[in-house]
Image (cartoon, grey):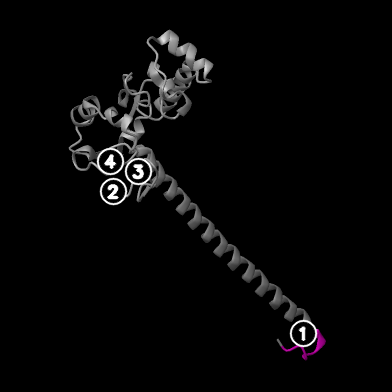
Amino acid sequence: LDWQQPAHNNKSSYTIIIIMISLTQTFHRSIINKMNHHLSTQIATTTTTTTRRRLRHTVAISREIPDSFIDAISFHYNQSSHHDDAATALLCSQDKGVSLLKSREQHTNYLNTLRQHIPINKLICLPPLESHPDCLFVEDSMVAIQDTVVLTRMGHESRRGEVDDSIKAILCEQLGLKNVYDMNNDSIEGCCDGGDVLYTGRHLFVGITDRTNQVGF
């Protein structure tokens, strides 16, 4: 604009400036609205994709707590003790700070929570294995991704009997999985606890620990 023009033209000059500012603000609002709409669409798409991914998890396998749970290797101070009956085991566990009653109450709550996300007929709870105190932690016995399952050879020798025929029967016969591999048939050196493996939906992260070695990886 020519600011040297006569004073009587200043009013029209101001009008032009105001119109330009108004048009610029309108343009900016339009761009922002389009960006917000695009962002909202992306969020909705991501949410839908996440929901679809979650819906794929339709089976859960658990196991009841054995009376021998207080001898689990997680409780090192109690590992060498053995109990002849459930009543003695209960009393001893309470003396050691491990309550079977409390543990079973928490396990029941855990199963009830699973039932909110998994169809009732797809929640499989196996019976306890008294000779394997750690059998409750069934996630260590396998790594399952969609229709493929690897039965693990667990790092602690006392746990290797937890991968029994009942698990294989459920996977192959009840669930009809065809791709079931048993590490115990392939290696005497490789070890892996399923709890050391994390699946993100696209990648597998494997922690090398005292229960999962490089050969197992």
Give the structural element (helix, strand or loop) at label 2.
Answer: loop
Q: Nearer the viewer, mark 1 or mark 3?
A: 3
Q: Which is nearer the N-term, disc 2 or disc 4?
A: 4
User: Which range of residues does the magenta coloring cover?
Assistant: 2-9
Marks 4 and 3, the one that precedes in the sequence: 4
**Residue linked to disc 4:** 146
Q: CA distance from mark 1 to mark 4?
A: 76 Å
Q: CA distance from mark 3 to mark 2?
A: 8 Å
What distance separates the C-alpha of mark 1 from that of mark 3? Answer: 85 Å
Q: Residue at x 37, y 23 (%)?
A: 133
Give the residue type that dot 2 points to: Val
Residue 158, quarter of the rendered image: top left
Q: Which residue is mark 1?
A: 9
Q: Amino acid at mark 3?
A: Thr
Label 2 belongs to which residue?
215
Q: Residue at x 23, y 24 (%)?
A: 166
**Location of residue 35 with respect to 72 vertically, above or below:** below
